[in-house]
Image: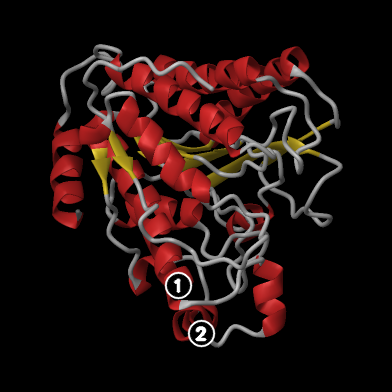
Amino acid sequence: MVFRVPLRRVNMNIYTSDQFVLPLPDGHRFPMSKYRLLRERVESIGLSNNLEVPIRADDIAVLRVHTPEYLARVRDGTLSDAEQRRIGFPWSLAMAERTRRVSGATMAALASAISGCGVGVNLAGGTHHAFADHGAGYCIFNDSVIAARHVQALGLARRVLIVDLDVHHGNGTAAICQDDPSIFTFSMHCGRNYPSVKPRGDLDVEVEAGTGDAEYLSLLERNLAFAHARAHADAMIYLAGADPYMGDKLGYLALSKTGLRQRDNLVFDHCRRFGMPVAVTMAGGYAPDVSDIVDIHQATIECAAELARTPGWYPPGKPASVFSCIAAAVADEWR
C-alpha cells in the first residue's frame, strides 16, 4: 500500500461520483469498489476539501457526441440485450445516472483547469470505448469527447489534445474524432489487446506485450512531444490508466508502480513546461488486488497536486489574463 503523506493545501478541483453506485451482479469482474476506496484515499492525504460532486451531463452536452437514438436508449432503458453485453453492464436507472455524472465530472475538471486552476481531476472517467451510437468495454458515454466539446462550446478552448495512456486503444474516441480536426487523439496502448479493431486516431502507438518501464517511458517522451507539436492544443485531457501495471490481469504490459508514477510526472512536466491546462481521468485498472489499482490512482493524484502547487506555471509566466478571468466566470456560472 502507498504510504499516506498528507499533502499541503492545493488549488485543484477533484470530482467524485462514487456515491452513484453501479449495481452489478455478484462475481462481476469490474472493480466498482475502487472509486469509493480512491475517494477515501484522497480524503486520507488531506484533499477532502478539494472534493466536489459533479453535476450531471445534460442532453445538450451528450448530444454533441452521441446520437439522439443512442441517448434515448440509455435514458429510457431500451438498450437491447446485445448492447448491454457489449457494454458489459446491465442497464439500470443507476447506470444511466452514473454515466451522466462521470461525464459531468470530466466536463467540470477540464473547465476548472482552463479557468485558472491549471489542473482538475475526475476520480473516474476515461470511458474511451464508447462510440457515437453505442457503448462497449465498460464505457457508455465518451466523457473525454463530451468534455472537449463542452469547453469548446463555452469558448474556453479551440483545440484539445487527448492523451490516452490506458493500456487499451481508445477506439471510441478515435472513431468519434476522425473527422474533427479540433480534437487531437493520441493513444499509446498494448497492440495485442482489446479491442481487436482499432480505428485510426491522430497518433496511435502500439506497445509490445511485456514492455517495461524504461522502454515505455522512452516511447512516451518522444511521442508526447510529437503529439504536442501536431495538436496545437489549448488544453489536454489525460487518461491515466492503471492497467499498464505488471500485475493487471487485462493489461499485458509490465510497468511497475514506480514506472507509472514516472509516466504521470512525464505528462505533468510537459503540461508545466508548455503551460497546458489538463483534466485527469483514472481510466482502467484490473489488478486482482484492488488496493494496487488504488495505489496507482493515488500516485497520479499526488503528481497532479504537485503540478497544481507549482508557483506561476498557469497561466504560464504571467498574471491571469482577461481570457482566464472570462473563462473562470463562465465555468463558475456553469457549475
Task: Work out whether residue 182 can be spotted.
Answer: no
Per the image, label 1 sits on a secondary structure element best described as helix
- Work out whether residue 242 or residue 329 is closer to the camera in this orientation and state it: 242
Image quarter of residue 180: bottom right
- Work out whether residue 212 or residue 257 is closer to the camera in this orientation and state it: 257
Q: Which residue is mark 2?
A: 77
Residue at image point 81% right, 57% down: 197
Sequence order check, earlier mark of 2 and 1: 2
Q: Position of residue 112 (x, y in %)?
A: 27, 40
Q: CA distance from mark 2 to mark 1?
A: 8 Å
Q: Which residue is mark 1?
A: 96
Name the residue type under label 2.
Gly
Q: Position of residue 103 (x, y in %)?
A: 41, 57
- Work out whether residue 226 or residue 287 is closer to the camera in this orientation and state it: 287
| Residue positioned most to the front | 26
Q: Position of residue 52 (x, y in %)?
A: 25, 45
Image quarter of residue 230: top right
Image quarter of residue 104: bottom left
Residue at image point 51% right, 40% down: 282
Residue at image point 48% right, 69% down: 95
Q: Position of residue 179 (x, y in %)?
A: 60, 58
Q: Are marks 2 and 1 in contact (CB under 8 Å)?
A: yes
